[in-house]
Image (cartoon, helix red, strand yellow):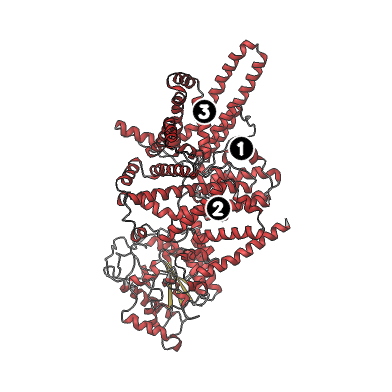
């Protein structure tokens, strides 16, 4: 009976955090054990069962939405594939002059199926996630009193919907073949470590790996656990320790000076990075245990020199998804190509292509903002980055000229550092709006930062009220330094994990013991601490 | 394969040694707040002379507001200790029971019943349970106040408390008794996990020659007839004696105008004296205890009693001393 009570559907929200005791002490070991004892042919089914079981435990009946997505993309993928096969046969049988017309005809069919499937999947996401926000705004604009719907969203819907759409597009574009195997599609979409917070994988990145996963190997197990440990350190020592301070300032910002708000914004940016990248370390580590290589979602973003570079290093799989499925299709569409041609004639080779690029960029950043959440603050967050990136492109020639004039070479170490710091400041401002309780709160906080940039109230009493002290900041600082040094080495092409793996056993073990004790001693858990919920799990 | 297994065993063996060493380093070296102990009043039992406690009392705030060990000592010569902490969960009650029995062998264990209704998640309990084996998990945060002596000083619990876990709250705030213990046939359900804890505590007591008693302390805010029925049904099923003091106005004549400091939520010292007088008598009538008031080995209890009678017992602000 107790076993069955443990398996109650939708009763295990704590499993959404990879670092919860329930997940680390029970769920993951049980999954590894179950997978390990399965015969080779059954391992893929074990992974699928664990993945659907995970979804069931967290979201209960809402697993129906996931199943709808799986079946719909599998079926529509096959449909598109079947149309393409018929097209190829018809083209082959037709005379050369007729071929173009036949292709056009079949293109219309495939587009129709693609639109049907993509909009169907997107529609579920739109209704569940955005209908409340939409109705709220309609009510306030038109003075109506339509009841605001509040649907329960299944875990990871924002992530697996993008994966589902990417599969359909890839089949449509012919980069992957429509899969006849429903189970493989299901495993691709539902793999349990990645469904909560990503990364957003492509079919050709993980589907075959997952389906052909083999025995658990000792080196994969140890390396995977190491990576989980590294993520645990980021989450437990930094993200959770900063939680009371960040929450205290953001929730009652009007009581704090601008300088304190600025510190909280920096702390929040660090917290978000440590939480999200820590979770990604856990996902990558877990996948590695099963012998699966996940795409990296973070590539040392705080070494970026520009905002556009930052977004090629932060939440990489989301950025590439928007680039591949929104930016390129928009810029490469016929009307945009025409627009670019016309603009190039009038505005020249630099500014001409920027017109169509700006439209595509706007679409990308609007979607990026909205994807993060149904609120104006998220839309502002998207538009903020749109403005920065577009602004950067517009002033690029002028800046280049100015740099040449004043002898500022961006390649010099000092100039490089200035650019990195500038990017960090811009990122922190963006994250301030991202975290603030609404757009108005974000504006007010930013206003205070600008008009009241003082720190005089930052004393021991204030920190005590926010349940944090100097020792907490010290340990956060030390941990950030550790992460920074490792990132710097990685940035210079030195793979720290690889180097460590080559060291003699006593050295490797010493490092691991140090990591374990560091997490246990300096982790922010137990009485007096409130762990931060997985920050990207709700997006 | 064999090599990997052996290497895994060696890795975890060394890790266990390191954890034990780190646990020793960070564990409070005494049972005081200054030394870093988390719940000094409840953990005071660790410093009591071996096998000197007759009655162990477990529970949440109801326990340490309702039972005065010094009153029971004064009237009956029975030693008791309250291992109560705010919002105590059943897994914590079990933990305190086990810790107390390492040095004590009380004949009666009283479990204040409000704790039995406190729900918790398994996730919440896991670190606490693990901390029984690895104290580092409970005291890891002491790195902030680590002193040189922590590196070499042995763990020695020596701070014997005069309050014996009781926390004195003075002042009075009248309670609303309109719906207090309104008759009902309904039975409040108790979560299976907490029933399991009660069974485990019962089995542990039986194994160690102690008797478990369930007692519901008077409270107009937290208690009602439906909850009482729930506990009574469970106690009946498990064969555990149960006393609901809320249903005994003649034996425990609580004046709800004067005997609570927070409007019926908890008892103040006056109310606790009434509960303790009754419980002392009840315990004496079991015939399990000898009157130790004249025993030399218990002279310190008499010293503490003097302080208690002179109204020197700790104030609310000093609980964590």
Q: Confirm or deny contact between disc 3 and disc 1 (CB under 8 A).
A: no
Q: CA distance from mark 2 to mark 3?
A: 36 Å
Crowding around mark 2 (Cα neighbors within 10 Å: few <14, some 14 to 19, many 20+) is many
Both labels 3 and 1 in a single chain: yes
Front residue of this view, candidates B16 and A155: B16
Query: Which residue has dot 3 on it?
Result: A328
Who is closer to the viewer here, A123 or A426?
A: A426
Q: Secondary structure at mark 1?
A: helix
Query: Which residue occupies 38% across, 62% down?
Result: B225
Tell me if residue B234 can be seen: no
Q: Position of residue A417 (x, y in %)?
A: 46, 45
Q: CA distance from mark 2 to mark 1?
A: 24 Å
Estimate the spatial distance between the alpha carbons at disc 3 and disc 1, rounded to whole Å. Answer: 20 Å
Q: Position of residue B175 (x, y in %)?
A: 28, 64
Q: Chain of mark 1?
A: A
N-terminal of the pair, mark 2 or mark 3, is: 2
Task: Tell me the subunit letter for badge 3.
Answer: A
Relative to B313, does residue A21 appear above or below in the rendering?
above
Kindly state the secondary structure of the residue where label 2 is placed. helix
Residue B276 image-quadrant placement: bottom left
* Residue carrying label 1: A205
Quadrant housing residue B40: bottom left
Q: Secondary structure at mark 3?
A: helix
Q: Which residue is mark 2?
A: A230
In this view, A136 is above or below A251: above
Q: Is residue B255 left or right of residue B35?
A: left
Q: Nearer the viewer, residue A459 or A344?
A: A344
* Horizontal and vertical percent position of residue B206: 54, 73
Judging from the image, mark 2 belongs to the subunit labelled: A
Side of A315 relative to A150 (left or right): right
């Amino acid at each position: 009976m107790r076993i069955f009570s443990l398996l109650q559907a939708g009763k295990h929200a704590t499993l959404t955090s990879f670092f919860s005791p329930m997940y680390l002490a029970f769920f993951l070991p049980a999954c590894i054990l179950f997978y390990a004892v399965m015969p080779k042919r059954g391992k893929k089914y074990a992974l699928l069962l664990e993945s659907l079981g995970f979804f069931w435990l967290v979201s209960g009946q809402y697993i129906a939405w996931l199943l709808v997505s799986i079946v719909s993309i599998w079926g529509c993928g096959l449909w598109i594939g079947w149309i393409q096969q018929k097209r190829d046969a018809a083209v082959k049988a037709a005379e050369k002059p007729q071929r173009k017309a036949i292709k056009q005809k079949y293109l219309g069919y495939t587009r129709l199926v693609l639109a049907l499937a993509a909009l169907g999947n997107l529609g579920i996401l739109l209704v569940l996630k955005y209908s409340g926000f939409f109705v709220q705004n309609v009510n306030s604009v038109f003075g109506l009193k339509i009841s605001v719907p509040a649907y329960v969203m299944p875990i990871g819907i924002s992530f697996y919907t993008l994966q589902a759409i990417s599969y359909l597009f890839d089949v449509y574009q012919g980069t992957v073949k429509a899969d006849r195997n429903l189970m493989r599609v299901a495993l691709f979409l539902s793999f349990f470590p990645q469904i909560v917070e990503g990364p957003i994988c492509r079919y050709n990145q993980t589907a075959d790996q997952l389906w052909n996963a083999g025995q658990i190997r000792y080196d994969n197990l140890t390396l995977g656990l190491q990576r989980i440990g590294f993520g645990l350190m980021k989450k437990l020592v930094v993200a959770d320790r900063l939680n009371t301070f960040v929450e205290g300032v953001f929730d009652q910002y009007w009581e704090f000076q601008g300088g304190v708000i600025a510190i909280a914004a920096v702390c929040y940016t660090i917290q978000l990075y440590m939480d999200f990248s820590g979770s990604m370390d856990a996902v990558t580590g877990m996948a590695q245990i099963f012998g699966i290589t996940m795409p990296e979602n973070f590539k040392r973003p705080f070494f970026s020199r520009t905002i556009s570079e930052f977004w090629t290093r932060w939440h990489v799989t989301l950025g590439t998804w928007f680039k591949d499925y929104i930016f390129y299709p928009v810029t490469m569409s016929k009307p945009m190509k025409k627009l670019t041609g016309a603009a190039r004639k009038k505005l020249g080779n630099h500014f001409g292509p920027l017109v169509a690029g700006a439209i595509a960029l706007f679409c990308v950043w609007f979607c990026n903002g909205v994807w993060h959440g149904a609120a104006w603050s998220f839309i502002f967050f998207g538009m903020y980055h749109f403005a920065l990136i577009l602004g950067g492109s517009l002033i690029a020639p002028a800046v280049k000229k100015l740099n040449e004039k004043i002898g500022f070479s961006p390649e010099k170490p000092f100039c490089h550092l200035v650019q990195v710091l500038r990017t960090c400041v811009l990122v922190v401002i963006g994250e301030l709006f991202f975290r603030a309780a609404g757009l108005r709160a974000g504006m007010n906080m930013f206003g205070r930062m600008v008009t009241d940039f003082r720190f005089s109230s930052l004393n021991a009493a204030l920190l005590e009220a926010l349940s944090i002290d100097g020792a907490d900041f010290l340990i956060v600082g030390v941990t950030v330094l550790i992460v920074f040094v490792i990132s710097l080495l990685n940035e210079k092409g030195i793979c720290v994990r690889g180097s460590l793996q080559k060291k003699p056993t006593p050295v490797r073990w010493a490092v691991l013991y140090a990591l374990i004790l560091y997490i246990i001693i300096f982790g922010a858990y137990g009485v007096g601490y409130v762990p931060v919920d997985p920050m990207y799990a709700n997006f | 394969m064999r090599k990997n297994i052996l290497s895994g065993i060696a890795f975890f063996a060394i890790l266990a040694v390191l954890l034990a060493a780190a646990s020793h380093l960070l564990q409070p070296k005494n049972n005081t707040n200054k030394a870093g102990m988390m719940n000094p009043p409840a953990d005071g039992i660790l410093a009591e002379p071996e096998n000197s406690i007759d009655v162990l009392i477990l529970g949440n705030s109801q326990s340490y507001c309702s039972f005065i060990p010094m009153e029971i000592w004064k009237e009956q010569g029975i030693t008791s200790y309250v291992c109560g902490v705010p919002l105590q969960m059943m897994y914590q009650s079990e933990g305190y029971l086990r810790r107390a029995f390492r040095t004590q062998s009380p004949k009666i264990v009283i479990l204040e019943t409000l704790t039995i209704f406190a729900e918790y998640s398994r996730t919440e309990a896991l670190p606490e349970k693990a901390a029984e084996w690895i104290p580092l998990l409970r005291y890891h945060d002491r790195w902030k106040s680590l002193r040189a002596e922590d590196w070499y000083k042995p763990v020695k619990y020596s701070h014997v408390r005069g309050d014996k876990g009781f926390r004195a709250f003075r002042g009075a705030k009248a309670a609303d008794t309109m719906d207090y213990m309104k008759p009902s046939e309904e039975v409040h359900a108790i979560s299976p996990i907490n029933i399991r804890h009660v069974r485990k505590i019962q089995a542990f007591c039986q194994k160690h020659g102690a008797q478990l008693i369930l007692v519901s302390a008077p409270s107009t805010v937290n208690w009602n007839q439906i909850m009482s029925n729930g506990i009574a049904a469970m106690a009946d099923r498990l064969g555990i004696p149960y006393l609901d003091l809320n249903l005994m106005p003649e034996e425990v004549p609580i004046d709800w105008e004067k005997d609570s400091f927070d409007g019926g939520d908890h008892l103040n010292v006056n109310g606790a004296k009434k509960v303790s007088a009754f419980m002392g008598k009840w315990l004496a009538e079991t015939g399990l205890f000898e009157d130790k008031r004249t025993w030399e080995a218990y002279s310190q209890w008499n010293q503490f009693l003097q302080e208690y009678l002179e109204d020197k017992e700790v104030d609310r602000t000093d609980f964590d001393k």
